[in-house]
């Protein structure tokens, strides 16, 4: 199975789409993780995220489309409402002083704008929830699958051969960036025992 290149300049490669049989059907083995051993559970999740990342991406797109097909109007209105909310948040955070001055000079206009914004959020709340379900449901399903799916020999072998895939796959880049931002150790470190000095 050849890898599909995403970008020739940056060397990021998308791993192949794993077979449905390997992903979820007959040859797939599932087990509830041991919640007392968080390191082992985290290792399983990270390795599955790296190995099945193309499958997870396709599954996420399919779930998002299914939610959009079931509620097309609410999904569209939710996307528009979320875009407006994010746009207003960005504008307010960059132009905070100007908005503060406007509210001081026109207190009634400030109150009216806040009331209209509250009415808009209330009116579009159902659509926002549908949109958020369309976004968060794929993340939830991906996490549940990555937590429950036991790694097979091929999964372990591919992750070892590819050097865990970090810096070469989209999920590897994402996990590395998440590691840099949060400080969480998402890379699997080799077991190195240090001898105490004599």
Image (spheres, rainbow, N blue to C red):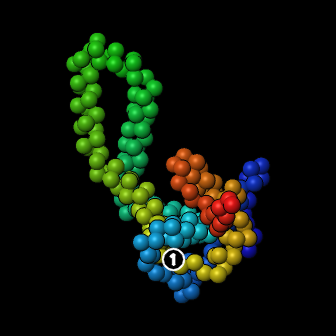
Is residue 90 rendered to the left or right of residue 53? left
Measuring from the top left, give residue 79's x and y in whole percent: 41, 47
Q: Position of residue 95 (x, y in %)?
A: 43, 23
Residue 146 seen in this snapshot: no
Q: What residue lies at 53% left-to-right and 54% top-to-bottom?
A: 184
Which image quarter: residue 114? top left
Q: In the shown orientation, is residue 149 left or right of residue 129?
A: right
Up/down of 88 relative to 198, above or below: above
Above or below, 106 against 29 in this view is above
For residue 80, above or below residue 109: below
Residue 55 in the image, given as x and y percentages of width and height: 57, 69
Quadrant of image for the N terminus:
bottom right
Q: Quadrant of residue 168?
A: bottom right
What residue is drawn where x is 38% and y is 53%? Answer: 131
> Which residue is the extreme one toward the top?
105
User: Which residue is rendered at x = 62% and y = 64% of the image?
Assistant: 188
Which residue is nearer to you in this view: 87 or 53? Answer: 53
| Residue identified by numbered label 1 | 149
Q: Dot 1, how many residues are within 10 Å of its Cα: few (below 14), some (14-19), or many (20+)?
A: many
Q: Could you tell whether 145 is left or right of 7 in the image?
A: left
In the current view of this chain or complex, which residue is farthest to the bottom?
A: 26
Q: Residue 135: percent from the left, percent from the top?
A: 43, 56
| Residue found at x 28% / y 48% | 125
For this rendering, which residue is in front, 188 or 113?
Answer: 188
Q: Secondary structure at mark 1?
A: loop
Q: Nearer the viewer, residue 179 or 14?
A: 179
Q: Quadrant of the C terminus?
A: bottom right
Let me know if residue 153 appears in the view.
yes
């Amino acid at each position: 199975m050849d890898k599909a290149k995403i970008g020739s300049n940056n060397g990021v490669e998308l791993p192949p789409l794993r077979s449905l049989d390997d992903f979820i059907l007959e040859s797939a083995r599932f087990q509830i993780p041991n919640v007392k051993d968080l390191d082992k559970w985290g290792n399983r999740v990270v390795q599955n995220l790296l190995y099945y990342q193309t499958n997870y991406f396709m599954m996420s797109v399919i779930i998002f489309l299914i939610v959009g097909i079931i509620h097309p109007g609410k999904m569209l209105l939710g996307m528009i409402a979320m875009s407006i909310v994010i746009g207003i948040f960005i504008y307010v955070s960059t132009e905070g002083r100007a908005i503060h001055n406007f509210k001081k000079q026109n207190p009634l206009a400030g109150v009216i704008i806040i009331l209209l914004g509250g009415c808009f959020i209330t009116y579009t709340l159902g659509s926002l929830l549908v949109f958020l379900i369309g976004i968060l449901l794929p993340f939830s399903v991906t996490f549940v699958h990555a937590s429950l799916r036991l790694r097979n020999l091929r999964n372990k072998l591919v992750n070892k051969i590819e050097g865990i895939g970090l810096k070469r796959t989209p999920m590897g880049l994402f996990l590395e960036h998440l590691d840099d931002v949060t400080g969480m150790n998402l890379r699997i470190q080799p077991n190195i025992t240090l001898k105490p000095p004599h």
